[in-house]
Image (tube, helix red, strand yellow):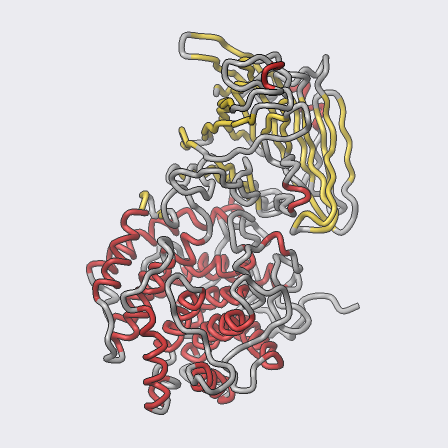
Amino acid sequence: MTLPPFLTLPPTDRVRSPRTGWTRAHWEAVADRMLDGLVPYASPGFAQYRLPGRNSWSGVVSDGLEGYARSFLLAAFRIAGAGGEVDVRLIERYAAGLTAGTDPDSGEAWPALTDCSQQMVEAASVAIALHETRPWIWDRLDERVQARVVDWFSGFVGHRTHDNNWRLFQVVSEQFLASVGAPFSQSDIDGGLDRIEDWYVGDGWYTDGDGRNFDYYIGWAMHLYPLLWARIAGEPDGERAKVYKERLSQFLATYPHFFSGDGAPVHQGRSLTYRFASVAPVWMGALTDATPLEPGVTRRLASGVLRHFVERGVPDERGLLSLGWHEPFLPTTQGYSGPGSPYWASKGFLGLLLPADHPVWTERELALPVEDADQYTALPAPGWLLHGTKHDGIVRLVNHGSDHYGFEPSGGADDPHYAQLGYTTHTAPNAAPHAWRHRVDSHLALVSPDGTPSHRGRIHPLTAAGRTASSWHTVTFPAGNGVPADGQSGTEAETVPGTAEYRIETTSVLHGPWEVRVHRVEAPAGVTVREGGYAVAGTELPWGESGRGWACARTADGLSSALVGLYGWDEDGDGSAAVHREVEANAFGPHSAAPCLSSGPHPGGSSVHVTLVALSGDSVHPRALREAVTVTVLEGDGGTGVRVSFPDGTVLTA
């Protein structure tokens, strides 16, 4: 059996790269393997790459264009970074694709750009790639082909995109039109750049469109395209570009805290199948001299991420990127994800545009924050806490602010990659539909008598400072199933339609390797309060054990997830603890397990529930923790306070 990595790599350099061993030559080798792996799936004129895998909702032709456009980004960075000194067939393939893709009689023509069409996304990649390879591709195209390319791009002018990061696709594409002397709309460009100002929330953070949409799109879209626009416009130091650089620098100041010692990014948000696109803003900071990071940190972070995936089979034995994380896993994707979608990972190779003698390639690698010491990082703009532990390299994201809803969600479903209380570099949510309907792992739910768990829904952030963050959300129950609507008794609820809303407020406090969660719950009589810890997963069935007020699951390689009930779980009465298991539900392996606690039937009204959450590469002893950590609930005029006392004498309040 062949094991990853599925490609031949250059020798490591432990002098220049003591942390990863990787150099620029490794990046070039991975890029070349990915580009070569696409060739067997090319259409005759190389305008489309019809890759194996589930098609997107846009159809096979759009998916074929996606394969071309996104891999063209990778080819462009490789070509331009080498000054054109690459295998000439690489240049010829993408030039031929432009010829056939814009020829309506070729049999492989690209779909026209229409309002809010997927082609708009792909056109932006083509525009960026054409700009970066201008001397080797655009300038050498036949004038008739250039005219057809311009005609295709002109579908952007005056047309509508989705009101989120898509506005920037129009910006860079029309700026490319301007750069080649073709008709364009300055109001489209200015309007798109002006619109992102409405989404800037401070500290280097944007939300992707209206609402609280915080994830990796902030780095690989909201920060990336404005500065790519500046490159195409020839205004790298213009007034707008100065603002974008300052914001990117602020963003990058804390961005390394999202990455573990083994190079894994925190597994949160949508389009995670883009994988190492997560390092694009790090490279952009170096490319535009807009980074607070030392060159050795930049390369350590970026090479660590790429190496992490390569060593886990990405690209696969065919040289392809699959729809998934380490292995194919469709719940990591969205309906718009087709087999070419993962090639937005090409953005992660932006660093190849930096010359080989740039300090980011020549200086010695430096440690990531989590490799130096335990880390606690509050990010008030997205409402997050980042928590890294040096001994095991794990980074945890405590989520009190990102929910992926618009301003006024109406009947929208919550998403496992946004709705959970926490995400980490070493775990993923049980995201498959058959598992997510249970809403157990990293979730606090009110469970109705018929077994239906509540959704987290809209998250209302309250605080994020130091080692503490808090938020609240409402739980809406439909009348029936024994849950009363407003002003009704339980009996009436069985027959009278209506709904009732109940508030849950959660405060997270970090101490050492642990998170303590304090839940202030309003609930109807008869429901059960249930909380789950992180789901650990692997190829083997995780070990699991539970006792009075605690539960723990552990993988074969020693990753442990534990949940300890410190207060309010009726441990001496009707409460229970268990290990919840799922199959084929998790991006990290077919077998997953999460510890969970359940209260007895709720009496109705207000209650307080306090839990200790642990995820560690070391041994965890939840029974001992339950005995050693004590909680005191304090009633006062300001509401219910909680004091938590730890074995080392530390006392925290929430």
Residue at 58% from the left image edge and 77% from the top image edge = 38
In the rendered image, residue 456, in percent from the top left (x then y), is placed at: 53, 33
Spot the residue most to the front.
495
Tell me: 119 left or right of 392.
left
In terms of depth relative to the viewer, which is nearer, 578 or 427? 578
Above/below status of 488 relative to 338: above
In terms of depth relative to the viewer, which is nearer, 162 or 271? 162
Q: Quadrant of residue 601?
A: top right
How many circles with numbers are drawn on the protein? Answer: 0
Q: Quadrant of residue 389?
A: top right
User: From the image, which quarter does the N terminus lie in?
Assistant: bottom right
Residue at 61% from the left image edge and 23% from the top image edge = 480
Above/below status of 299 relative to 264: below
Spot the residue most to the left.
239
Tell me: 411 left or right of 207.
right
- Residue 30 visible? The answer is yes
Residue at 59% from the left image edge and 28% from the top image edge = 445
In the rendered image, residue 648, in percent from the top left (x then y), is placed at: 58, 22
- Residue 292 visible? The answer is no
In the rendered image, residue 455, in percent from the top left (x then y), is placed at: 55, 33
Above/below status of 460 relative to 572: below
